[in-house]
Image (cartoon, helix red, strand yellow):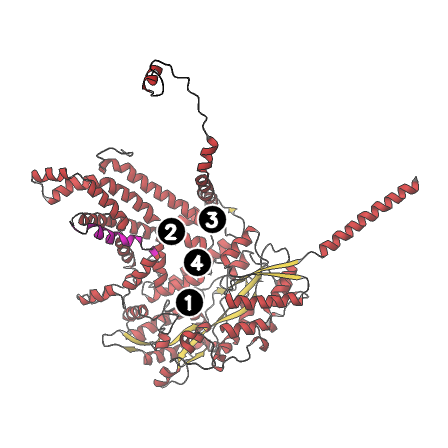
C-alpha cells in the first residue's frame, strides 16, 4: 500500500500532504505478561508441573512416605504382564466406550430430531430433555441405584407387571451392571443433544424442499441430507465421547460403592488409577497407568482424526479439512 | 604489659565461657513442644484435649499442641513432606502394616522396653498387644477397641425354642434353617442368618469368616496363607453349603438368587428400619458401636435399659467344630497412634503417647460416651455405670482368642478387600474352583507385599 493512498484515505490529513513517519509502537510485554499471568500460573503449576512430575514418577516406586525410587520400566512391565486388574479395567472401559458412544450419538440425534418437530412448547420440551444433564453425577447415580433396585425399584416392578418374571438384577448382577450405567448415560444425554439440535436447525430447509420436489422419501432425506450435514457434529461427539469414556469414573465408582461391586464388573480404567494411587498408595504405578491412558486416548483420537476425511462432510470448510 | 595481656586473655576466656553457659541454659530452657494430630471432632476432641491437659500438668515445661479433624491422608502427606506431627492417630488398625512397613511411624521396641517403657501384656488386652505389631515391629500404641461380635434376637430364637445363641457353625446352620421363612412367591421373608458379603457394612466380612474357622492370614508371618491353610477353603465351602441348604432347598444357584434379592431390599443401616431391628434377620455379626442403636433405636445412647423393640443378646462368633476353643471370641481392632518419622522430639513424644494410651480417665469417659471400650486392662478404664447388657462386649474383647488378623504392608489393607471380593464372587456363583481362586489370591497378596517391602 503506497503512502499517498494512506494519506488520501485519512480523514485527518489534507489531500496531498504526506503522513508523518509512523512511530514504532513498543510492545507492552509486561502488560501482556501480567494479563496472562493467572493462566500461566495455573498452566505451569497445576498442569505442566504435575504432568512432568507424573511422567517422572511413572518410572519410579513411590509410596508417598519414602522418596521416589527409580525402577525404570518395571511399572509398565507389571501393568502389561502381571496386573490382571489392569486388563479387567481396560476391558470394561473399551466395552463401555464401544457400546455407549454410538448409542449416545444415536439417541442424542434422535432426541434432537424429535425436538425439532413440536410447533408449540418447543422450549419447554428442550429444557425438559436438557435438564438431566445438569443433575450432578453422584446424585443421578444414587437415584438410578434406587430405580434399578431388584427388590423395590420401579423399573423391575414395571417389567414384572408386563410379564417379565425374572427381570435383571441390574447393578447387582455383573452381566447387567454396565447396561445400567449405559442407561444412566443415555438419561443424561442433554449436553450432546443440544449440539445435535443446533446442527439440525442449521440444515437449510431449502435442501429438504428440493428433495421433496424430487420425490425423496423421509429416509432418503435423512440419509442424503441430514446425516451428511450432521457428520461434523457426530465427529465432534465421537472424539469427546472417546476422551470422556476413557476417563469414566464417577458414576461407576458411586454405583459400585452403593451395591458392593465385588465382581469388578464396574471397575474401569480411571477406577484402577484411583485405587492404585489412593488405596494401594502406589503413586508411581498410578502415574504409569495415567500415562498409558493418555497414549491410548491419543491414539484413538488420532485414528478418528485421520479417518474423518473419508466420512465427515464440511459444507463451509473446516480447520480439519 | 604481660599482666595486661594476661588480664585480657582471662577476660576473653571468661566472656566466651559465660556466653557458652548462657547458650546452654537458653537451649535447656527452649520450649518442649509435641504436636498431636487426631481425627477427632466435637465431644471426642474435647475429651482428647482434656487428657492432653493432664499430660501437660504432669510434665511441667512440656507443651502439647493438639490438632483435631485430621484424617490419615493428610497426616501421611505431611509426614512425607517432612512437616508432619510428632504423634498421629489412626482410626482402626487396618493401616498399621502400611504405617509400620513404610516407616511413617517409628519403631517403638526400644522405647517400650526402655526405662520409661510399658509392660504391654499387663497393660493392654491380648488382642491389642498382638495387633499393634506388624512385620515384628511394634510401631503403635492402642487406644480404644472396636469389637465385632455375634448379635442375636432373643425373642425370635425363643419362639423357635432356642434359649442360647448357636455356638458352632453347624448350630448356626440348623438355627437358620428353622428361623428362615419364605413368602408365597418363594422369596425370602425372614432370614435366620445371612452369610453374604455386602449385606451390611460390618456384616459378613472375610475377617469374621476366618475367625470362625481359625484360618490364618499369613504362614509363619511371611507369606499369605489363603491357599496353604485349608481352613479357608473349608470356610468358603461352608458359606456355599449354607446358602444352598438354608435358602435354596439344596440348590445353591436358587439360594444365591433369592439372597441377592433379599439383600437388595435390606433396610437402612443407620436407623430403625435396619433388618435386625425390624426382625427381618434374627442373627448377625456386627460392631459394638451398633449396639446402642439396637438398644434404643435412633437415640444411639448407651442406656441402662434397652427400649427398642428388638430384644437382643451379644455373644462370641459361632465356631467350626475344630475351632471350639475359640468360642467366645470375636474380631477386635483398635484405634492406634504412633510417632511420626522425622519427629524432632521423640523422647517427649513418647512421654505424651504413653500418657495418652494409659490415661484411664479418658478411656472411661470415651467408653461412656461412645460405647468404645478401652484396650487397657485396668478396671479404672471402665466407666462406673456401664449397663449390664453391654458386659458381653467386654467379654468378647477380653477373650484371649479374640484378635485382628496379622497386618502386612499391603497399602490400605488390600488383602482384606481382595478376600472380600473373592467371597462375593463365590457367593454369586461366579467362581467355580475356590482352591485355585485362593491360590491366585495368595500369590497376588505376596506380590503386593514383595513390592512394598
Q: Earlier in the sequence, mark 3 or mark 2?
A: 2
Q: Residue furthest top?
A: A16
Please give the residue where the numbered disc 1 appears in the rendered image.
B206
Cα separation between marks 4 and 2? 25 Å
In this rendering, the label closer to the viewer, 4 or 2: 2
| Same chain? Circles 4 and 3 | no
Q: Residues within 10 Å of mark 1 (few under 14, many from 20)?
A: many
**Element class at badge 3:** helix
Which of the 4 image quadrants contains residue A160? bottom left
| x and y, in percent, of residue B213 in the image | 44, 72
> What residue would you read off at disc 3?
A284
Of badges 1 and 3, the one in the foreground is: 3
Point 89% across, 44% down: residue: B7
Residue B32 visible, this angle: yes
SS at badge 4: helix
Quadrant occupied by the C terminus of chain A = top left
Q: Earlier in the sequence, mark 4 or mark 1?
A: 1
In the rendered structure, which segment of residues is drawn in magenta?
A118-137
Q: Pointer 4: what residue?
A: B443
The residues bearing labels 4 and 1 have C-alpha atoms spaced at a distance of 18 Å
Q: Secondary structure at mark 1?
A: helix
Question: Residue A61: within the magenta?
Answer: no
Residue position for label 2? A270
Tell which subunit mark 3 falls on.
Answer: A
Q: Please say whether residue A134 is one of the residues in the magenta stretch.
A: yes
Subunit ID for the residue under disc 1: B
Q: Are marks 3 and 2 in contact (CB under 8 Å)?
A: no
Amino acid at each position: 500500500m503506497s503512502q499517498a493512498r494512506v494519506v488520501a484515505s485519512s480523514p485527518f490529513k489534507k489531500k496531498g500532504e504526506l503522513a508523518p513517519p509512523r512511530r514504532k509502537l513498543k510492545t507492552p510485554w509486561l502488560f501482556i505478561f501480567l494479563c496472562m499471568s493467572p493462566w500461566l500460573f495455573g498452566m505451569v503449576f497445576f498442569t505442566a508441573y504435575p504432568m512432568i512430575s507424573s511422567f517422572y514418577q511413572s518410572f519410579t516406586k513411590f509410596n508417598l512416605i519414602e522418596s521416589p525410587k527409580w525402577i525404570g520400566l518395571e511399572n509398565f512391565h507389571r501393568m502389561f504382564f502381571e496386573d490382571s486388574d489392569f486388563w479387567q479395567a481396560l476391558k470394561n472401559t473399551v466395552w463401555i466406550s464401544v457400546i455407549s458412544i454410538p448409542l449416545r450419538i444415536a439417541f442424542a440425534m434422535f432426541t434432537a430430531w424429535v425436538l425439532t418437530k413440536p410447533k408449540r412448547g418447543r422450549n419447554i420440551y428442550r429444557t425438559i430433555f436438557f435438564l438431566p444433564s445438569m443433575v450432578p453425577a453422584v446424585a443421578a447415580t444414587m437415584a438410578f441405584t434406587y430405580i434399578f433396585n431388584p427388590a423395590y425399584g420401579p423399573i423391575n416392578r414395571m417389567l414384572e407387571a408386563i410379564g417379565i418374571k425374572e427381570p435383571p438384577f441390574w447393578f447387582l448382577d455383573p452381566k447387567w451392571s454396565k447396561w445400567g450405567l449405559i442407561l444412566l448415560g443415555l438419561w443424561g444425554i442433554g449436553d450432546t443433544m443440544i449440539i445435535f439440535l443446533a446442527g439440525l436447525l442449521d440444515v437449510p430447509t431449502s435442501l429438504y424442499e428440493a428433495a421433496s420436489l424430487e420425490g425423496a422419501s423421509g429416509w432418503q432425506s435423512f440419509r442424503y441430507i441430514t446425516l451428511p450435514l450432521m457428520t461434523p457434529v457426530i465427529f465432534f461427539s465421537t472424539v469427546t465421547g472417546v476422551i470422556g469414556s476413557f476417563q469414566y469414573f464417577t458414576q461407576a465408582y458411586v454405583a459400585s460403592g452403593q451395591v458392593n461391586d465385588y465382581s469388578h464388573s464396574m471397575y474401569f480404567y480411571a477406577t484402577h488409577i484411583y485405587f492404585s494411587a489412593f488405596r494401594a498408595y502406589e503413586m508411581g504405578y498410578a502415574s504409569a497407568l495415567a500415562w498409558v491412558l493418555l497414549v491410548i486416548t491419543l491414539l484413538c483420537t488420532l485414528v478418528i482424526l485421520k479417518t474423518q476425511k473419508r466420512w465427515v462432510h464440511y459444507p463451509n470448510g473446516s480447520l480439519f479439512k | 604489659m604481660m599482666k595486661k595481656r594476661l588480664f585480657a586473655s582471662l577476660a576473653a576466656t571468661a566472656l566466651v565461657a559465660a556466653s557458652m553457659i548462657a547458650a546452654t541454659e537458653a537451649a535447656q530452657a527452649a520450649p518442649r513442644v509435641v504436636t498431636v494430630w487426631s481425627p477427632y471432632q466435637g465431644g471426642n476432641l474435647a475429651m482428647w484435649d482434656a487428657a492432653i491437659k493432664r499430660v501437660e500438668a504432669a510434665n511441667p515445661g512440656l507443651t502439647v499442641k493438639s490438632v483435631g479433624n485430621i484424617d490419615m491422608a493428610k497426616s501421611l502427606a505431611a509426614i512425607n513432606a517432612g512437616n508432619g506431627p510428632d504423634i498421629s492417630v489412626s482410626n482402626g488398625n487396618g493401616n498399621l502394616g502400611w504405617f509400620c512397613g513404610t516407616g511413617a511411624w517409628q519403631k517403638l521396641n526400644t522405647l517400650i522396653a526402655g526405662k520409661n517403657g510399658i509392660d504391654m501384656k499387663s497393660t493392654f488386652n491380648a488382642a491389642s498387644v498382638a495387633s499393634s505389631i506388624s512385620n515384628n515391629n511394634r510401631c503403635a500404641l492402642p487406644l480404644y477397641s472396636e469389637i465385632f461380635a455375634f448379635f442375636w434376637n432373643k425373642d425370635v430364637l425363643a419362639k423357635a425354642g432356642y434359649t442360647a445363641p448357636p455356638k458352632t457353625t453347624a448350630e448356626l446352620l440348623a438355627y437358620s434353617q428353622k428361623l428362615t421363612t419364605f413368602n408365597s412367591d418363594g422369596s425370602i421373608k425372614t432370614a435366620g442368618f445371612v452369610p453374604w458379603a455386602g449385606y451390611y457394612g460390618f456384616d459378613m466380612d472375610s475377617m469374621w469368616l476366618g475367625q470362625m474357622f481359625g484360618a490364618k492370614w499369613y504362614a509363619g508371618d511371611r507369606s499369605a496363607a489363603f491357599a496353604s491353610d485349608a481352613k479357608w477353603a473349608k470356610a468358603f465351602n461352608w458359606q456355599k453349603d449354607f446358602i444352598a441348604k438354608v435358602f435354596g432347598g439344596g440348590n445353591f444357584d436358587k439360594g444365591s438368587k433369592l439372597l441377592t434379592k433379599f439383600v437388595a431390599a435390606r433396610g437402612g443401616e443407620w436407623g430403625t428400619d435396619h433388618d435386625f431391628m425390624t426382625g427381618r434377620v434374627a442373627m448377625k455379626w456386627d460392631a459394638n458401636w451398633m449396639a446402642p442403636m439396637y438398644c434404643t433405636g435412633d437415640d444411639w445412647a448407651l442406656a441402662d435399659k434397652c427400649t427398642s423393640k428388638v430384644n437382643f443378646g451379644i455373644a462370641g462368633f459361632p465356631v467350626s467344630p475344630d475351632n471350639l476353643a475359640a468360642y467366645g471370641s470375636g474380631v477386635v481392632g483398635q484405634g492406634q497412634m504412633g510417632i511420626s518419622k522425622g519427629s524432632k522430639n521423640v523422647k517427649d513424644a513418647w512421654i505424651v503417647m504413653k500418657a495418652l494410651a494409659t490415661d484411664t480417665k479418658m478411656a472411661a469417659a470415651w467408653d461412656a460416651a461412645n460405647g468404645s471400650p478401652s484396650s487397657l486392662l485396668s478396671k479404672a478404664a471402665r466407666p462406673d455405670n456401664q449397663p449390664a447388657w453391654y458386659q458381653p462386649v467386654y467379654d468378647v474383647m477380653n477373650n484371649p482368642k479374640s484378635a485382628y488378623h496379622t497386618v502386612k504392608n499391603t497399602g490400605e489393607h488390600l488383602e482384606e478387600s481382595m478376600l472380600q471380593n473373592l467371597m462375593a464372587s463365590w457367593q454369586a456363583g461366579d467362581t467355580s474352583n475356590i482352591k485355585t481362586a485362593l491360590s491366585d489370591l495368595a500369590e497376588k497378596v505376596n506380590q503386593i507385599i514383595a513390592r512394598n517391602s
